[in-house]
Image: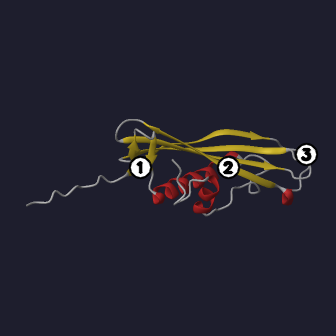
């Protein structure tokens, strides 16, 4: 009796878009750059394109502000869009099963893209070399958003 070997299809992804979705900059006459604060969040959307392709979008949203006045100085959204093939899409649950390692990789790339986009977008402003996104541990960021490895919700 022969056993049928079921060959699993490998998951693959490609980056189809990297762009600044939004940039808003205010340049006050006086600013203590040492006091510049940052807050941020991550937005993710997933859409099944067909049986084998899924679109995943990460928006890395960053806000820089003056803590003394609460004035928002920079609002930046860096977007990275992927097409991922061979993810398991559940029609009943209307969900997509994304392996933990893939989630970390995709977010890590999106964060790196957002860092580069922001650096480029503030290049000709007073924030050049002063406003930047920090290097982060992607697993910690995903944990805060509820999409960390082992924390998937249906």
Tell which of 101 and 121 is nearer to you.
101
Disc 3 element: loop
Tell which of 98 and 71 is nearer to you.
98
Q: How many labels does the image show?
A: 3
Crowding near pointer 3: few (<14 within 10 Å), some, many (20+)?
A: few
Q: Pointer 3: what residue? A: 29
Crowding near pointer 2: few (<14 within 10 Å), some, many (20+)?
A: some
Q: Pointer 1: what residue? A: 13
Image coordinates of residue 46 in percent, x first then y, are: 50, 41
Tell which of 84 and 73 is nearer to you.
84
Disc 2 element: strand
Work out how far the residue at label 3 is from the one at label 1, CA to CA, in angstroms: 45 Å
From the image, state whether disc 2 or disc 3 is nearer to you: 2
Q: Residue 34 carries which label?
A: none
Q: In which quarter of the image is residue 8?
A: bottom left
Image coordinates of residue 62 in percent, x first then y, are: 70, 48
Tell which of 145 and 12 is nearer to you.
145
Residue appearing at x 85%, y 60% in the figure = 34
Task: Tell which residue pokes out farthest to the front in this image.
Answer: 92
Residue appearing at x 64%, y 62% in the figure = 135
Q: Which colour scheme is used?
A: secondary structure
Q: Earlier in the sequence, mark 1 or mark 2?
A: 1
Residue appearing at x 74%, y 46% in the figure = 124
Q: Pointer 2: what residue? A: 41
Task: Tell which residue pokes out farthest to the left in this image.
Answer: 1
From the image, state whether disc 1 or disc 2 is nearer to you: 2
């Amino acid at each position: 009796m022969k056993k049928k070997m079921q060959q699993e299809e490998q998951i693959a992804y490609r980056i189809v878009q990297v762009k600044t979705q939004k940039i808003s900059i205010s340049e006050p006459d006086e600013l203590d750059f040492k006091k510049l604060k940052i807050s941020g969040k991550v937005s993710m959307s997933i859409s099944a394109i067909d049986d084998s392709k899924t679109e995943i979008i990460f928006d890395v949203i960053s806000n820089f502000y003056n803590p003394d006045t609460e004035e928002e100085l920079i609002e930046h959204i860096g977007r990275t869009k992927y097409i991922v093939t061979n993810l398991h899409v559940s029609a009943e649950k209307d969900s997509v099963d994304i392996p933990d390692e893939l989630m970390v990789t995709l977010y890590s790339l999106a964060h790196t893209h957002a860092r580069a986009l922001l650096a480029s977008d503030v290049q000709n402003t007073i924030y050049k070399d002063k406003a930047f996104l920090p290097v982060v541990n992607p697993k910690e960021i995903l944990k805060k958003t509820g999409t960390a490895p082992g924390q998937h919700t249906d």
